[in-house]
Amino acid sequence: MRSRAMTLLEVLAAAALLAILVAACLPWMSSMYEGQADRSEISAQELGWIADQVLASPEEYGLVIESGSSTMQRIAFQDDRVSGTEDLAVTVRWSEDPELDHGWVSFEAGAVAVSRWIEKPTNGEAGP
């Protein structure tokens, strides 16, 4: 029995179907790649968790919180549970009103920022 070869029209139709399938899958494949690229940035929830960890023991991370002056510091935070946290900008802000007994600490990593309320140290002590 003699085998029949494909005609030019059949080859062109198969190539067109294959091109349509590839074009349909490209947006899906592109969104998967973008999702992986975005994962390298820290989320607000992760940064909030880091802020809580740092404020629980600021001296461990080299964070100095002194009453009376607003400061901006850079600290390093490494943890296997989150990514993209090598360098954090931490800003401590105090009100100029002596009646207020609290301040704010802002943590920034890339385009994500969170703030935490802290009590003013008493008697010139450092720390939250």
Image: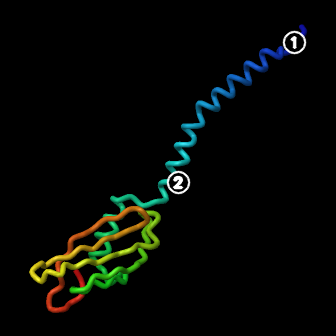
In the figure, is residue 53 to the left or right of 9? Answer: left
Q: Locate the N terminus by quadrant.
A: top right
- Residue ID at (73%, 18%): 13
Mark in front: 1 vs 2 = 2
- Residue ID at (41%, 62%): 111
How far across and how far down the image is residue 6, in percent? Answer: 83, 15
Q: Is residue 6 above or below residue 96?
A: above
- Residue ID at (14%, 80%): 97
Residue receiving disc 2? 37
- Residue ID at (41%, 72%): 88
Q: Is residue 60 above or below residue 108?
A: below
Q: Earlier in the sequence, mark 1 or mark 2?
A: 1
How far across and how far down the image is residue 49, in percent? Answer: 32, 65
Q: Is residue 6 above or below residue 100?
A: above
Q: Amino acid at mark 2?
A: Ala
The part of the image, by quadrant, that contains residue 12 is top right
**Local SS, label 1:** loop
Residue receiving disc 1? 3
Crowding near pointer 1: few (<14 within 10 Å), some, many (20+)?
few
Q: Amino acid at mark 1?
A: Ser
How far across and how far down the image is residue 118, in percent? Answer: 20, 75
Give me the C-alpha separation between circle 1 and circle 2: 50 Å
Q: Which mark is residue 98?
A: none
How far across and how far down the image is residue 39, in percent? Answer: 47, 55
In the figure, is residue 20 to the left or right of 66? Answer: right
